Image (tube, rainbow, N blue to C red):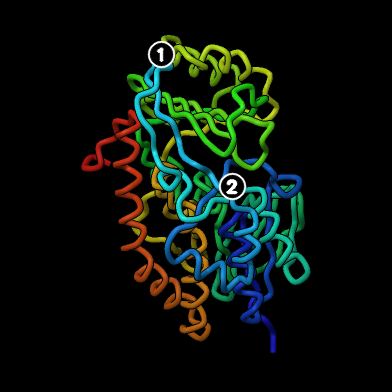
Amino acid sequence: MTKTTVLISGASVAGPTLAFFLNRDGYEVSVVERAPELRDSGYAVDFRGEAFDVLEELGVLAEMRGHDTKMRGTTLLDDKGGETGRLPAEVFAGELEVPKQELTRILHRITADDVTYVFNDSISALTQHDSGVTVEFERGTAREFDLVIGADGVYSKVRQLAFGPHADALRHLGLSGAGFSTANHLGLERSGLLQQGSGAALYLFSSGAPGRLTASFSFATASPALDRRSRDEQENAVRVAFAGFGGQAPRLLEAMSEADDFYFSSTCQVHLDHWSCGRIALLGDAGYCAAPTSGMGTSQALIGARTLTRSLASAAGDHMAAFAAYEQELRPYVTQNQAAGHQAATMFGGHADLADS
């Protein structure tokens, strides 16, 4: 019997998780990733609630617990650097927190022998027909697949090709931010500092690597336009936003230009009327990002992958029924997380109006 072929775009968290479950259920799975190799960047990620059941089903829960950052809490500071309070570890770290690169490494390891991974390539065109989807690639040869799943993040190429422009799906929550790591001159050990001012916040922490300090600058913006600008323009926007900050901010603003892991992104959600279109469906941030401020992105990706897999199994090959069931089951959970993400963004200086978005 011929196996159902599935192409997944994105090799971060949602994609490899789905690949594991689909391969287990007898699908022939390929994953395409535009990065040249497995990504080793990104902050720590945390797990909450039902996500632990998914990790158990993947067979990696005990290993994940071995990478727990064991964060101890965060000290609150005013914009001049004076201490104002303290937050418990659970606020940022959830029930379990691990470095993201460890999560992606483990997910890749448990799928690499059975799933075809293609790095340094990306989908360039999708053409649906009665029996499948013709997929064209930027570098590779065009291929036919029965199903295509976009698990390729907020700026999903699959979503752009099959559902429409990014602007139609993205909902900016009024915040943008830059992150990078530098030497841990503060000697922080599994702890953080959160410095807040008008419309801006600086979060510093050290977790998995004691010699490194991660700095995250967040500030109010009217749109996510800076995401597509040059690094120089992004750095300049950060300096302007934090010009009045004291404490550690001036030193870290100087260190920013020297960082080789500088990262910039805006706090956005993805809102769509439907998560599938024929034989193409979206998973995780590509279809329903709740924003980093929700603290639920990783858990939502894991739970979404398992929900989609179960829906496909229950539908016995009827992908239309499976995609509908997947969305019906998961959308209330996503709606709840997106509301939490919006509320948290306003606390950090965001100004998006939920009623208008």
Residue type beneath disc 1: Lys
Separation (CA) of disc 1 from disc 2: 28 Å
What residue is shown at x 54% (from left), y 21% (from top)? 234
User: Residue 246: x percent and y percent?
Assistant: 45, 12
Asked if marks 1 and 2 touch (Cβ < 8 Å), the reply is no
Question: Which residue extends farthest left?
Answer: 355
Q: Is residue 72 visible?
A: yes
Residue 80 is labelled as 1
Disc assigned to residue 95: none
Q: Position of residue 178 (x, y in %)?
A: 53, 28
Q: Is residue 141 left or right of residue 72?
A: right
At mark 2, the secondary structure is loop
Q: Which residue is mark 2?
A: 69
Which residue is situated farthest in the top direction here?
Answer: 244
- Is residue 55 left or right of 351 when viewed as pictured? right
Which residue is depicted at the point 49% across and 26% down? 217
Label 2: few (<14), some (14–19) or many (≥20) C-alpha neighbours in 10 Å:
many
The residue shown at (61%, 27%) is: 187
